[in-house]
Image (cartoon, rainbow, N blue to C red):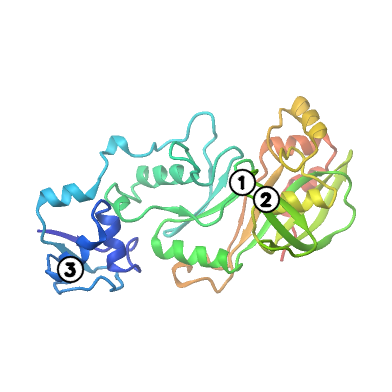
């Protein structure tokens, strides 16, 4: 007999969902058969599988070691994802951390989460960090994996939020989904922007090219978007903008600014090729100068986020972004972006 006590990371999910994670190679029919025969019990009683698990609940498996091993699919420690980022990428800075959540400053060039099986993403870095710091164990990974709650494009830098426990992950994801979190970006665009604007419209995505097209009129399959921006400073033909997302769609800021005639410097999909080539030659710039700089969590955040409620997370600009701004005579006061981003 094997006994498993539900911890905080595992609470809040259905018993059958937990069993699928705990013994991932077993068919679902196996679980329901074992539950009916009381070979798997919950708190010493027969269970149906639909019960919602609470911290401290006890699941007992009256199964042979051979059966448990056959269906567990556990990896040996040496086979788990690496705990350190590849040397080609800087490790993300930890901007804020509490018992349940962590906010990281993702560098440009790193994926937020895997796109292919051999990718290394922010999620792998986070998992390695939690394993190394003792906040997560190999056994925990059988039933729970840390995950990010918002995603940035590979070549966009800045704040990414993640849940270290299942309840926190669920609450944070809900806040992002319901637009309860305020998100502010900084970007350097080609051209001089003298007035703030609040624009909305529709994005249509082309899955084959992974590009989106902005339009002021609705069309089948288009998603409504809303963006606000205001100039902080301009010089030598470029403008430093503060951008607030009211919706969060793929490439929203990049496509929106390009459609307004102010493409983001360094943007390979929506920017100006000749301009980008010039910045690549002069500064070695290979990614768009777009940075998720500020994220504000509402005071009335969920019960799992009590420590985080009402906080504002800030991420400093990458050095290359600052270097380009200085070269283009963007005032140093605005490079101290904490003072440049408006309260709100």
100 or 120, which is in the foreground? 120
Q: Quadrant of the N terminus?
A: bottom left
Q: Is residue 169 left or right of residue 73?
A: right
Q: CA distance from mark 1 to mark 3?
A: 44 Å
What residue is shown at x 33% (from left), y 39% (from top)? 80
Q: Is residue 340 visible?
A: no
Mark 2 and mark 1 residues within 8 Å of each other at the beta carbon = yes
Q: Is residue 57 left or right of residue 175?
A: left
What residue is shown at x 50% (from left), y 29% (from top)? 87
Q: CA distance from mark 2 to mark 1?
A: 8 Å
Q: How many residues crowd around disc 2 within 10 Å: few (fewer than 14), some, or many (20 or more)?
A: some
Label 3 element class? helix
Residue 251: which numbered mark, if any? Answer: 2
Q: Is residue 303 visible?
A: yes
Q: Quadrant of the C terminus?
A: bottom right
Disc 1 versus disc 3: nearer the observer: 3
Which residue is identified by label 1? 153
Label 2 element class? loop
User: Measured from the top left, where is residue 296 in percent x and y?
Assistant: 62, 62
Which of the two labelled residues, at mark 3 and mark 2, occupies the earlier sequence position? 3
Which residue is identified by label 3? 35
């Amino acid at each position: 007999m094997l006994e498993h006590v539900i911890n905080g990371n595992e609470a809040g999910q259905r018993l059958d969902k937990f069993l699928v994670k705990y013994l991932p190679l077993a068919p679902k029919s196996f679980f329901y058969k074992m539950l009916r025969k009381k070979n798997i019990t919950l708190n010493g009683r027969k269970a149906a599988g639909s019960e919602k698990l609470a911290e401290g609940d006890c699941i007992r498996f009256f199964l042979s070691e051979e059966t448990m091993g056959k269906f567990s699919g556990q990896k040996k420690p040496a086979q788990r994802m690496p705990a350190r980022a590849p040397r080609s990428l800087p490790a993300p800075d930890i901007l804020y951390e509490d018992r349940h959540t962590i906010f990281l400053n993702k560098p440009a060039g790193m994926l937020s989460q895997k796109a292919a099986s051999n990718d290394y993403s922010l999620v792998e870095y986070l998992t390695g960090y939690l394993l190394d710091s003792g906040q997560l164990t190999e056994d925990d990974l059988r039933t729970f994996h840390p995950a990010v709650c918002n995603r940035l494009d590979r070549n966009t830098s800045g704040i990414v939020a993640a849940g270290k426990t299942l309840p926190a992950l669920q609450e944070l994801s809900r806040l992002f989904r319901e637009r309860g979190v305020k998100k502010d970006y900084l970007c350097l665009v080609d051209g001089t922007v003298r007035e703030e604007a609040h624009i909305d419209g529709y994005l249509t995505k082309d899955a084959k090219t992974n590009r989106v097209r902005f339009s002021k009129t609705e069309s089948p399959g288009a998603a409504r978007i809303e963006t606000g921006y205001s100039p902080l400073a301009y010089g030598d033909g470029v403008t430093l903008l503060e951008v607030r997302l009211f919706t969060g769609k793929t490439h929203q800021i990049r496509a929106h600014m390009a459609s307004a005639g102010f493409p983001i410097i360094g943007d390979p999909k929506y920017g100006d090729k000749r301009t980008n080539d010039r910045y690549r030659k002069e500064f070695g710039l290979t990614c768009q100068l777009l940075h998720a700089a500020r994220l504000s969590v509402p005071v009335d955040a969920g019960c799992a986020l009590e420590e985080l409620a009402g906080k504002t997370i800030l991420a400093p600009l990458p050095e290359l972004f600052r270097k380009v701004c200085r070269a283009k005579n963007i005032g140093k006061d605005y490079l101290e972006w904490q003072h440049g981003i408006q309260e709100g």
